[in-house]
Amino acid sequence: MSTFTLPDSSPPVTVNSTKDLSKDQLLSFPAFKNWISTLQHSLSIQQSKDHTFHAAPYKLRNIDIQSVDFFGGERIGFIKLKAEVSNDNGEKLPGSVFLRGGSVGMMMILQPDDAPKESETDKHVILTLQPRIPAGSLSLAELPAGMIDDSGTFAGAAAKEIKEEIGLEIPQDQLTDMTKLALPSTEGTTGENLQQGIYPSPGGCDEFVPIFLHQRRVPREQLKEWQGKLTGLREHGEKITLKLVPLDKLWREGGRDAKVLAGWAFYEGLRKEGKIY
């Protein structure tokens, strides 16, 4: 175990790390950098007399790194830690944290090109079916998840499957960030610097997920072909498969996935406000 003081922390924060995680590795891990800066900012605004905790402000006292998972050599994947956050009255806030950073959810809507424009007629959404061991599932239906890569394209395992199965790539200039359109900045409301994304499990995980929208009109016969192809039985051993779901049944078909429910709610709300069509 190694111990060091978190740079620029006041009061000084002691970090107890595991033997396989160095100070430099921890401080350069993007998820940790984002989490600690967000938390420290939120703690700092307790100085305002209008803040709920102004009379007995909470402080970050120490951080215990409990475990780390590496992806491919020395690239950090996940960190499990416990942060002690308490006030001078001895009151504590829950501080068990699973750090993994952000990802991207993609709501991809396909519509026959002979349907009336700016209508909801025959719209379908692509879902992925894949094993999610933390949920105890070998076939969980969810919005495709991934990242926006350096070239500005939706990327990751789900994006690869979409490209392989139906030949679609999604460039950044054809994406609408529904989260940014729907959610006001927390700086102007609470004063905090939270991410422009949904937090699926904020009681234990830092993960935030912006939900992007991509809509595309395709030939009706092409849509029927994809629908028949993707709704067949999963091939033996295939880890990720796709499913086309009618938009009006999305909330039921994918309702166990927080990304689905957030995407559906953002889409319906923004459409009613005339911000998307």
Image: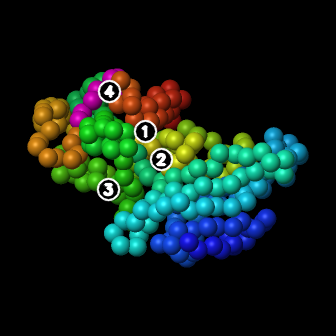
Residues drawn in magenta: 243-250
**Which of pointers 2 and 4 lies earlier in the amino acid sequence?**
2
Separation of disc 4 and disc 3 at Cα? 23 Å
The numbered dot on residue 259 is 1
The foreground one among 179 and 141 is: 141
Tag 2 near tag 4, CB within 8 Å: no
* Residue located beneath label 4 in the image: 253
Separation of disc 2 and disc 1 at Cα? 8 Å
Tag 3 near tag 2, CB within 8 Å: no
Separation of disc 3 and disc 2 at Cα? 14 Å
Q: What residue type is labelled 4?
A: Glu
Where residue 17 sits: x, y (%)? 57, 68
Tag 1 near tag 3, CB within 8 Å: no
Q: Residue lying at the far front in this picture: please name it.
A: 1
* Residue located beneath label 3 in the image: 156
Where residue 185 sits: x, y (%)? 64, 46
For the point 50% across and 26% down, the residue is: 272
For the point 26% across and 37% down, the residue is: 139
**Dividing the image into 4 quarters, which one contains the C terminus?**
top left
* Residue located beneath label 2 in the image: 209
**Is 138 on the left-hand or right-hand side of 7?**
left
Where residue 110 sits: x, y (%)? 28, 36
Q: What element carries label 1?
A: helix
**Which of pointers 3 and 2 lies earlier in the amino acid sequence?**
3
